[in-house]
């Protein structure tokens, strides 16, 4: 694809101040999202997946510092937008779906109004058109009898149905980018599949880019074109799904793949990654994964590995990526 | 493909869904007999407050010295006081003035408290800290004493009394809504709304306030009888509504010294006032159960 990227993030840093400590949550994350592309952002809890996205949208709260070298979305420099302009971009050009549909809808507002609200607030459509469009959206996300359900309240819906409503809200203004923050985590497995297929259908129908934040490899590899692996607030590997599955080049990625169950893997034992991810109270100066890494050499404890290109579209931040690739195991 | 008939059917179904929520609340309310009795009296009280001035047989300032301190008769169904005022008319006008003061003072306190509390809770930081210190001051300072000072300063008319009650009343509403907002501010609902472009003002008006309005209404239902009481208490020490404007406090205070000779002067206003306060509290209690069945307000 020769198109210019829809979203370009360069060297994003997010620090939280907690008491006298500073927590370095995101430490120089860079990535791009192409038009129509689905990017999966995977990593453990605390790896900075959600904070990365919230930082972009200006939504992190508390005593927080966000620094970024470049944050370009379409023709906008996100760092230069006023609070008001950013509010307008959010929801109109960038849609967001959150993890828990049970708590993210307003319990005292009719669901139809919540979909319409997004369009009216952004002056996307006049009320009559917004109403008709809401019914269309309900049909598209698979809410049967939308005209009747328009005036229902969120508590009258199941979790899966509520997530469909959240999807309808998020795409109401036809955003070019949809950020889905663990959209299926709070749902039953069967419902997860339904939501993913709805999302897939929405995406293929409108060439919308999706950033899917998840810790579920199955979700990420089924849905996405490209996977970013985050560890301790840094991108450790970025690869197309095929490379990610066939040639993981970072020991952490390999570790993650070894620690999940797959159908047909009966007899293979799960190998958990020893230890737990660090909470950084200082900016990283060495590989943050080294203490847990079976491939670690002295260099890893001294030098911070930078993201480097292994092959076209496959980048990794590991001093020993070649050895990891050669290692069969 | 929205066919009109379908729309009508949908509207009908949705309307029934809405009434069912209201109906459930009403069913919970009705299950409390005291609340129902209280509601009946409160409604009668409001009705009297509205029509009282028109049905009162005499004016509130109209005296008849020849009939002073007279027991109830057909012309004066509740008797007369030492100046020959018709007690029945006095009470009807008192209801009107008492309700006007209590309702306007409570609504003003409610409005100010709601806005400031929402702002404090949503904004956090130094806005929250300074507003809540002001609230602490109003909680720490005896409200009745402050009311007395304000009424002394600004006079004993309707306006000054409403102002004084509102000044001492807003802090409770502010603290209540601020606490409720803090519980929701960092929740997913607000995060989702913000993520989809809602401004802080929009979040406050469409998300936070509607979610706490039932708690606030319960507080308001407790606030109105509170203001009725304070207003009467002001009259008892002679700082209430300026005579000849009648008020329950004035009547009760004046009658206290004559209880052996002219007991009806005390029984009627004190009885009606006591029943009214009790009714308001029963209603507030019933609302609490009806609107907030999980408790914790």
Image (tube, rainbow, N blue to C red):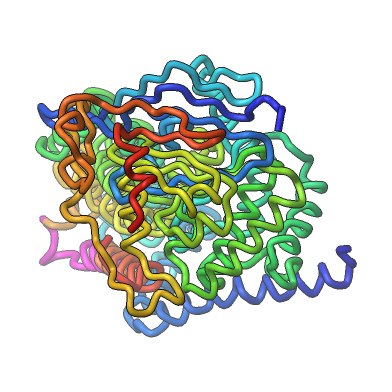
Quadrant in the rendering for residue B87? bottom left
Quadrant in the rendering for residue B196? top right
Q: Residue at x 13, y 29 (%)?
A: A21
Q: Residue at x 28, y 32 (%)?
A: A62
Residue in front for this viewpoint, B243 or B148:
B148
Where A257 sits versus A233, above or below?
below
Task: State yes or no: residue B260 in magenta.
Answer: yes
Where A188 sits versus A272, above or below?
below
Q: Is residue B181 visible?
A: yes
Q: Is residue B134 visible?
A: no
Q: Residue at x 89, y 67 (%)?
A: B3
Q: Which residues are magenta?
A: B257-272
Q: Position of residue A1 (x, y in %)?
A: 70, 33
Task: Give the tally of numbered discs.
Answer: 0
Q: Residue at x 49, y 53 (%)?
A: A246
Q: Locate residue B152 relative to residue A37 in the image: left or right.
A: left
Residue in front for this viewpoint, B53 or A76:
A76
């Amino acid at each position: 694809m020769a198109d210019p990227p829809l979203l370009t993030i360069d060297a994003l840093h997010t620090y939280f101040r907690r008491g006298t400590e500073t927590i370095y949550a995101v430490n120089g994350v860079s990535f791009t999202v192409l038009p129509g592309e689905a990017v999966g952002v995977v990593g453990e809890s605390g790896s900075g997946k959600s904070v990365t996205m919230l930082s972009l949208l200006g939504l992190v709260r508390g005593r927080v510092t966000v620094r970024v070298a470049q944050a370009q979305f379409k023709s906008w420099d996100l760092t230069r937008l006023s609070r008001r302009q950013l509010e307008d971009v959010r929801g109109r050009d960038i849609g967001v779906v959150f993890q828990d549909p049970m708590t993210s809808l307003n319990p005292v507002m009719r669901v139809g109004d919540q979909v319409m609200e997004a369009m009216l607030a952004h002056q996307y459509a006049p009320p009559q058109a917004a109403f008709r469009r809401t019914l269309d959206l309900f049909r598209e996300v698979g809410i049967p009898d939308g005209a009747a359900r328009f005036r229902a309240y969120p508590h009258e819906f199941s979790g899966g149905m509520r997530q469909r409503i959240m999807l309808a809200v998020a795409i109401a203004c036809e955003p070019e980018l949809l950020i889905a923050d663990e959209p299926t985590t709070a749902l039953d497995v069967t419902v997860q599949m339904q939501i993913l297929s709805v999302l897939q259908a929405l995406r293929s129908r409108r060439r919308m880019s999706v950033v899917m934040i998840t810790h579920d490899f199955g979700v990420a590899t089924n849905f996405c074109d490209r996977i970013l692996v985050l560890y301790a607030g840094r991108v450790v590997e970025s690869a197309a799904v095929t490379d990610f599955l066939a040639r993981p080049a970072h020991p952490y990625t390999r570790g993650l793949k070894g620690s999940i169950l797959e159908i047909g893997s009966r007899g293979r034992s799960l190998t958990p990654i020893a230890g737990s991810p660090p909470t950084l109270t200082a900016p990283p100066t060495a590989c943050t994964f080294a203490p847990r890494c079976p491939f670690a050499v002295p260099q890893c404890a001294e030098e911070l590995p930078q993201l480097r290109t292994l092959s076209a579209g496959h980048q990794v931040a590991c001093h020993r990526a070649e050895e990891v690739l050669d290692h069969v195991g | 493909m929205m066919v009109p008939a379908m729309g009508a059917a949908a509207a009908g179904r949705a309307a029934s869904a809405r009434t069912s929520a209201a109906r459930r609340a009403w069913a919970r309310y009705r299950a409390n007999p005291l609340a129902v009795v209280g509601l009946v009296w409160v409604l009668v009280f409001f009705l009297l407050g509205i029509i009282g001035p028109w049905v009162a047989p005499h004016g509130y300032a109209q005296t008849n010295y020849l009939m002073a301190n007279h027991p109830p008769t057909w012309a004066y169904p509740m008797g007369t006081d030492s100046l020959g005022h018709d007690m029945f008319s006095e009470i009807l006008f008192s209801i009107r003035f008492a309700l006007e003061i209590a309702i306007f003072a409570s609504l003003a306190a409610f409005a100010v408290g709601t806005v400031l509390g929402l702002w404090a809770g949503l904004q956090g930081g130094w806005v929250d800290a300074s507003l809540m210190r002001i609230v602490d001051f109003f909680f720490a300072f005896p409200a009745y004493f402050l009311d007395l000072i304000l009424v002394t300063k600004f006079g004993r008319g309707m306006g000054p009394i409403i102002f004084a009650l509102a000044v001492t009343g807003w802090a409770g509403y502010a603290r209540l809504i601020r606490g409720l907002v803090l519980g929701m501010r960092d929740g997913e609902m607000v995060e989702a709304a913000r993520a989809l472009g809602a401004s802080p003002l929009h979040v406050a008006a469409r998300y936070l306030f509607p979610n706490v309005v039932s708690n606030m209404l319960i507080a308001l239902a407790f606030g109105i009888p509170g203001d009725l009481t304070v207003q009467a208490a002001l009259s008892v020490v002679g700082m209430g509504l300026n005579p000849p404007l009648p008020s329950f406090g004035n009547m009760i205070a004046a009658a206290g010294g004559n209880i052996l000779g002219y007991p009806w002067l005390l029984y009627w206003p004190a009885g009606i006032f006591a029943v009214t306060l009790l009714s308001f509290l029963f209603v507030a209690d019933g609302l609490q159960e009806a609107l907030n069945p999980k408790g914790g307000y």
